[in-house]
Image (spheres, rainbow, N blue to C red):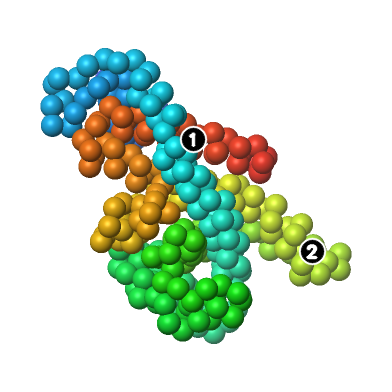
Amino acid sequence: MTGQPKKQSRFRSIFDSDFTLGWMLVLPFLVLWAWWFLYPFVESFIRSFQDVNFAALGDAKFIGLQNYIAILNDKQFYQAVLHSLQIVVVAVPVQTILGLLMAILVNQNIKGKGIFRTVFFIPYITSQIALTTVFMMLFKQGTFVTKFFAFFGLRDVTWFADTGYALMFVCILFIFQQCGFSMIVYLSALQEVPKDLYEAGDIDGASKWEKFRFITVPFLKPITFFVISVSTILGFQIYDQIAAISRYGALGSPAGATSTVVTYFYQHGIRYMNIGYGSAAVILFFFIIMFITFLQKKFLDDKE
């Protein structure tokens, strides 16, 4: 006796589809992303056109582009943007190159590479406030670190308290902390490079430098774009280190030498409770990052 195949219900066929399953898996992330990122961004965009105080959000008054005009006429804003750009331009390339070199080192067949990998990565997972505090003790006038740099023509001063060295101090701190992130990302990518390519290079008589230049670097190009993009965003978002440096003075101390776009927003939006003005600064900050990321993509010519 042959039985008739049961007709699958429409309800079950929908939930058995890969399309529905995929949306069910990403739905929790989309909900959290919309709640934690999309909604605050839209709210900030709306507030940027208002005159609103943090203590009286219900008394908001629409003022059009006045917040943006005031910011673009403020010299302190341009100083903050310039400092943020200096951190990114100096620190991001250095930490990217160092991260790649460290990844190549720990990817070799050497004894204790697991220890090296752990030691290099520890600064990245260490509290930024704690790490900044340690660096502040190391970069005080008269320590072996400042005396070491004095051999290269730099002055033996307390770096984080000197207007000429404070921003350099922040850059060094950022490089030291972010190298571990770049190393881990590059290390995972290096382990995916096909060994056949290196074997073909050996057959062709390629040197180590030629294999690195013509095999490793092109293969890592998408990873390099990712590392630079993420590091650029993190560089623009530096706050904890500067807050630790400025704990005994105004945010951005000394004398505004470490002010950034984030500290500018915090100063006006949170400390002065001018949410509309601070929100306008955040929106401008967002478009600055988007523009720089676009330039990076064009420069690296990422095809992935």
Which quarter of the image is occupied by the N terminus? Answer: top left
Residue 169: % across, % down: 46, 64
In the picture provided, is 102 more to the left or to the right than 241?
Answer: right
Amino acid type, mark 1: Ile
The residue positioned 41% from the left and 72% from the top of the image is 158
Q: Residue furthest right?
A: 204
Q: Residue at x 15, y 20 (%)?
A: 59
Residue 22 appears anywhere in the view: no
Identify the residue at horizontal 60%, vertical 74% (top origin): 153
224 shown above or below 298:
below
Q: Nearer the viewer, residue 133 or 116?
A: 133
Going by the numbered disc 2, the residue's amino acid type is: Glu
Q: Position of residue 133 (x, y in %)?
A: 32, 69
Mark 2 lies on a secondary structure that is helix
Reading the image, the residue beneath label 2 is 210
Residue identified by numbered label 1: 288
Asked if the residues shown at circle 1 and circle 2 are in contact, with their CB atoms under 8 angstroms apart, the answer is: no
Q: Nearer the viewer, residue 2 or 184?
A: 184
Q: Nearer the viewer, mark 1 or mark 2?
A: 1
Measured in 3D between alpha carbons, the distance from the residue under mark 1 to the one under mark 2, in whole angstroms, is 37 Å
Q: Earlier in the sequence, mark 1 or mark 2?
A: 2
Q: Position of residue 243 (x, y in %)?
A: 30, 56
